[in-house]
């Protein structure tokens, strides 16, 4: 079952440095979504709901974006808000013939767990379809070869995927610099 989390109607773009009641509401929803999908113990499963888009919020947003196969920019814009509120149902349906960077990320994730053995080229071809079907069978969901919300839900929860998204991975090393810089400037 896709979990929809009640969200505010007005969903402004939020980024590092933003501060307002809407940031506090976003932090609450972020905590709920992280509790649902976070598999990496070193990540902040629960951030403080301060109303300030601080370094910890930035890191948690980036982590959630990575988990959700969204662009990792730390900005809570329309796609991130959609995932925060609607979960995997907000992600695109991918099927035979789709070509995109999201398909490439799916191929990488499926390759990491041994389901995909083709070229990681961003083209949802026959090999990707078979890999998705085999993954779906292993998760005991309908094996139609289409990346719908149920398949996204299972793919996001893979331990190997969450380990790629960990905050201490090289992908997030610039965040440590931002956090350290922030700490130095606030003293």
Image: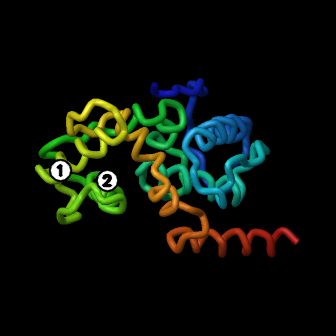
Q: Nearer the viewer, residue 167 or 142?
A: 142
Residue of label 1: 124
Mark 1: which secondary structure?
Answer: loop
Q: Which of 154 and 63 is in front in this view?
A: 154
- Measuring from the top left, give residue 128's x and y in whole percent: 19, 51
Would you name the residue on which mark 2 appears? 106
Tags 1 and 2 touching, CB below 8 Å: yes
How is the protein colored in the picture?
rainbow
Q: Distance between the residues labelled 1 and 2?
A: 9 Å
What residue is drawn where x is 45% and y is 56%? 161
Residue at image x 64%, y 38%? Answer: 26
User: In the image, 137: left or right of 37?
Assistant: left
Asked whether 40 or 61 is in front, the reply is 40
Helix or strand or loop: what does disc 2 sit on? helix
**Residue 124 on image: x %, y %:** 17, 50
Looking at the image, which residue is at 42% across and 50% down?
Answer: 70
Within 10 Å of disc 2 (Cα), the crowding (few <14, some 14-19, many 20+) is many
Location of residue 117 (image quadrant): bottom left
């Amino acid at each position: 079952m896709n979990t929809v989390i009640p969200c505010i109607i007005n969903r402004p773009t939020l980024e590092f440095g933003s501060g307002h009641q809407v940031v506090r509401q976003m932090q609450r929803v972020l905590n709920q979504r992280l509790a649902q999908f976070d598999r990496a113990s070193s990540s902040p499963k629960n951030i403080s709901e301060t109303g300030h888009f601080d370094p910890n919020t930035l890191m948690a947003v980036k982590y959630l974006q990575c988990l959700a196969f969204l662009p990792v920019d730390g900005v809570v814009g329309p796609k991130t808000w959609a995932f925060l509120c609607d979960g995997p149902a907000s992600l695109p349906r991918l099927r035979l013939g789709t070509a995109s960077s999201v398909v490439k990320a799916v191929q990488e994730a499926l390759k990491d767990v041994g389901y995909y053995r083709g070229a990681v080229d961003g083209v949802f071809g026959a090999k990707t379809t078979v890999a998705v079907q085999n993954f779906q069978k292993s998760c005991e969901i309908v094996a139609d070869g289409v990346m719908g919300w149920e398949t996204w839900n299972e793919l996001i929860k893979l331990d190997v995927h969450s380990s790629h998204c960990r905050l201490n991975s090289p992908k997030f090393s610039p965040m440590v610099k931002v956090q350290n810089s922030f700490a130095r400037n606030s003293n």
